[in-house]
Amino acid sequence: MTNTEQPVTTADLVLLDIDAGADKAAVIGRLARQAADAGRCTDPDGLTGAALEREAKSATGLPGGIAIPHCRSPYVEVPTIGFARLHPKVDFGAPDGGADLVFLIAAPDAGGAEHMKLLSSLARALVRPDFVAALRDAGTAEDVVTLIDGAVHPAPKPTSPKPTSPKPTSPKPAATPAAPGTPATPAAPQAADAPKNAARVVAVTACPTGIAHTYMAADALTLAAERAGVEFAVETQGSSGSTPLAADVIAAADAVIFATDVGVKDRGRFAGKPVVASGVKRAINEPDTMLAEAVAAAGNPAAARVEGGGGAGGAADAAPGSGDVGWGTRTRQILLTGVSYMIPFVAAGGLLIALGFLVGGYQLGNGVDGQRPAGYGLNSVGAHIAAANSLTDLPDGGLRVYLGAVLFSVGQLAFMFLVPALAGYIAFAMADRPGLAPGFTAGAVAVFVQAGFIGGLVGGVIAGLVAAALGRIDAPRWLRGLMPVVIIPLGASLVVGLSMFLLLGRPLAAAKNGLEHWLAGMTGASVIVLGIILGLMMCFDLGGPVNKAAYAFAAAGLSVTDVPSMRIMAAVMAAGMVPPLAMALATALRPRLFSAPERENGRAAWLLGASFISEGAIPFAAADPLRVIPSMMAGGAVTGALVMAFDVTSKAPHGGIFVIFAIGNVLGFVLALAAGTVVGAIAVILAKQLTGSTPASPAPVAA
């Protein structure tokens, strides 16, 4: 039987009425080991870590006693569903308490569309009360397998044609039990009180992995619409693919629901429509309430509307209770969008520069004969080599130096896109595609006026605000087609360009230069304090917004390859390596303080930490944040301070020990990293001992 023909679950993947441990990490670890024993997983600890990393983004517990931890993993070759019926219940973050029905949904990294459809079919079945009740009543593992197989391979319905919109004459009875995650009633009558077919609503659902929540939210909203007699259509932007809503369906809609944890693809299609926006889990937990809010927004001229071109105006902010994303969260999303798109340029450019140094020697940073000409690139070294009559006449190391100069210059060219990419995608996050051109323009102007990273941030925000404002203009119908491709980019680019050149360029450049001079002038205690601050930031959220802010600050300064910037880069990289290495050391020194999955994660964390992948500590932090995170911050602060004290530098923005050739004062780097790792490990061991920590799965599981 091929992988694609294997069933998604079998009896040996089902555990009934067991005590799987005290927390969700233990439960996930138990199901992952069950998958490994069944030959469905090559590394249960790797699968556990991937599932816990997904849990760290958003809890997978659902109302009604259900949890669906899920992930993609390279350790899974066959789409797999493990199931455990727990006694007692375990908390997975649901608002109404613990879960007794837990599904571990594991998909291969390269899972095809058919595989994703199987897994998403199960998720959709979980909104049916009859399916959930049958799982609780199942007497054997084989009964559970039959139920799951029926969910992922549903029998054809007797009447395949289905009306696209429910008719008022045949809504489902009001007494139909609410889906898991649906408030028991009073929200349902709220939606049902609206006149039948008074509004046509469309929705988009999407979650980070696109396996489970995406489809559960879609079905929960569909059932709510049937109960209320509202015309409804939904587009699922998930891993098993989706059929985009037809243009005429969107045009006829009176309101739109965005239930997403990620950006909505082609958001501009809904421009001008009244909108109710939230995370995907709210659509599962409160589908009737969200639908009622959408119906109310359809008749409210002041309702929040989708931005991005044409359409009626309306308030920019959602009314209270609409479920729209708050400005604090929205601001973080905007800035992280810019940083996340900037980082590939940093990594590619920085590593190419480091390789240039490795191949051509560190004299590349100072040009030929110790003199670095303005705009240094290939010209000086290339001219030096071209003066030779043939390759045999090249001076010693000439070809090697030339190749190094090529790598160095390509890296510098990649770095030139750093600030434009930051500004461009900040504007994109605020105004969608019409914001891209003015955002990149703002970033290019920031580079031209030497306002640097700070100028890119400010220019990107201005470009996004102006583009979004222009998109809210109620343009005549004949002009709407030109708005997103001509009018908005032109107008926003003009405004941001004039603002940067005439008003903001010099102050921002002065601020950037002042910051650089301040950093360059730091000595003694002040530079050590900076190292402590950077170390704390790198270990605070292990790859989250604070970590990314510190990394972006260091990487942006690296483009000038001066000593203060390279010291900051070294402090950031070394401190970011501490959390995985410290947790690996702690699990090796005191294994009894950690569960079996954590001990396995600790072995993997050695390589992750050595590679500067801070996320390797996320499984530990997700399971025990109050003890793990402060301990890691202590270790990161020590490493950051020592890197500064030892005057360590790094010419590479990433790579950990694998770019050791780009580290200045290697011994100081190693000592600082070792000290922080030891401090972090001892801190977490003491924290667990002094507070009476026990492993997540202290006893063997009763099968």
Image: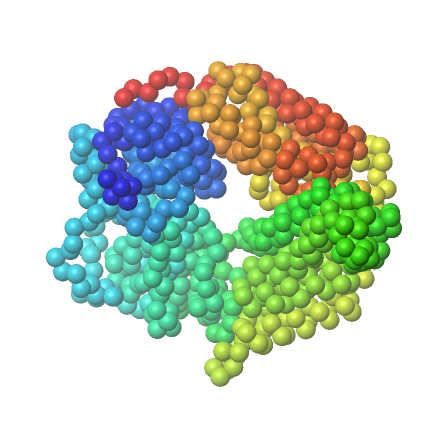
Foreground of the two, 184 or 587: 587
State left or right for residue 629 relative to residue 503.
left
Foreground of the two, 352 or 425: 352
The answer to whether residue 233 is seen in the rendering is yes
Q: In which quadrant is the C terminus drawn?
A: top left
Question: Residue drawn at (22%, 45%), measured in percent from left and top?
Answer: 151
Q: Quadrant of residue 132?
A: top left
Residue 130, given in percent of the width and then of the height, sits at 20, 43
Rendered view: 322 above or below 249: above
Foreground of the two, 224 or 299: 224
Question: Residue drawn at (56%, 25%), measured in percent from left and top?
Answer: 583
Rendered view: 329 above or below 144: below
Residue 302, given in percent of the width and then of the height, sits at 48, 68
**How many numbered discs?**
0
Question: Residue drawn at (28%, 44%), measured in percent from left and top?
Answer: 4
Report the colour scheme: rainbow
Residue 658, given in percent of the width and then of the height, sits at 63, 35
Rendered view: 124 above or below 94: below
Question: Residue drawn at (21%, 65%), measured in percent from left and top?
Answer: 163
The answer to whether residue 27 is seen in the rendering is no
